Each structure stands twice: as structure tokens, then as C-alpha cells.
Amino acid sequence: MALLFDPGSLYGVAADDLLGRVPWHRRKGRGHWLCEFLDGSSNAIDPGTYTAAVGDEVTQTLPNAGMPRFAAVVLGKSAAFGVGRLTEISTGQITMGLRIIVPLVCPDFERCPAQATVCTTLLKPEVEAMLRDAHLASDL
């Protein structure tokens, strides 16, 4: 957590820049709209959002091509898992980055509607490595 809240950290600088870009009419009493926007954005690119749709499409399409239903279900679930792994590799850091920045821009994190997802993200083992890498990069 010390790495996250270090004022010179990459995420601290990004949070300051983000808050500096908030229009003046949204700054006073801004509530949690920015927290919700960041959390919603991370959910939109979360691999789980798309994997079920891919699996369902494969499961529905294959029986129409003559494959037995049980085999289509297995292949649909396998396709969903594969797509999930591939998209997680490419979007995982972006998703975590959006959630990690929430406590830095939140006006009252104890009452933040994104608190649960942010805390869950912060507990992931890969977050510490990501914060350390960002901290080392900001020192360069």
C-alpha cells in the first residue's frame, strides 16, 4: 500500500493528472462518479464479460453443424476458457490499473461503491509486482 500512496508513484501522478482534468463544475461535491466510471470501465474490459458470450455462441453453433450437443457444450466451455485466458493476458494490467487508481481519486473510500472490487483487486498477488515495477519505472 505504501507503493500505491507514494506521491511520486506512477499511479499517484496519474491520479493527480486525472483529477486535474475533471471539469470545474464536477469537482465540488463530486461524489463517487469517477470511482464508478473507473470501476465500470474495468468491468467492461474484464475478460469475464466476454467469455460466456463466446462459449454460448460456440455451444449453439456446433449442433447446427451436426455435432452432438454434449460435445458442443464441452467445446463451448473450452473455447470460453481459452478466450478468457488470452484476453486476461492482454487486459489484466489495464483492468487492475483502473481499479488501483480508485483509492487515489476517491473522496471517501469508506463509502465508495467500488470499494469491494478495488479491495479484491488489491489483494491479488500480482498487484504488488505491478506496483513495484511502476515504482521502479517512475524512479528512472
Image (cartoon, rainbow, N blue to C red):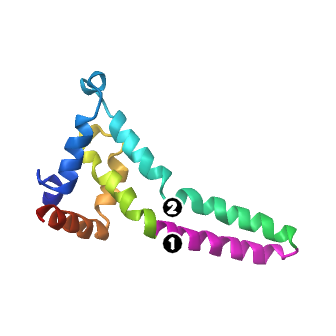
At horizontal 43% and vertical 47% (from top left) the residue drawn is 41
At horizontal 86% and vertical 71% (from top left) the residue drawn is 65
At horizontal 57% and vertical 69% (from top left) the residue drawn is 83
**Residue 107 visible in the picture:** no
The percent coordinates of residue 84 (x first, y second) are 54, 68
In this view, the residue in front, 45 or 112, is 45
Three-letter amino acid code of the residue under disc 1: Arg
Q: Which residues are magenta?
A: 66-88
Q: Residue furthest top?
A: 25
**Residue 93 visible in the picture:** yes
- Name above or below for residue 129 compared with residue 48: below
Seen in the image, is 44 located left or right of residue 11? right
Q: Label 2, on which residue?
A: 47
Residue contact at pointers 1 and 2, CB within 8 angstroms: yes
Secondary structure found at label 2: loop
For the N terminus, give its image quadrant.
bottom left
The percent coordinates of residue 135 (x first, y second) are 16, 63
Residue 31 inside the magenta-drawn segment: no
For the C terminus, give its image quadrant.
bottom left
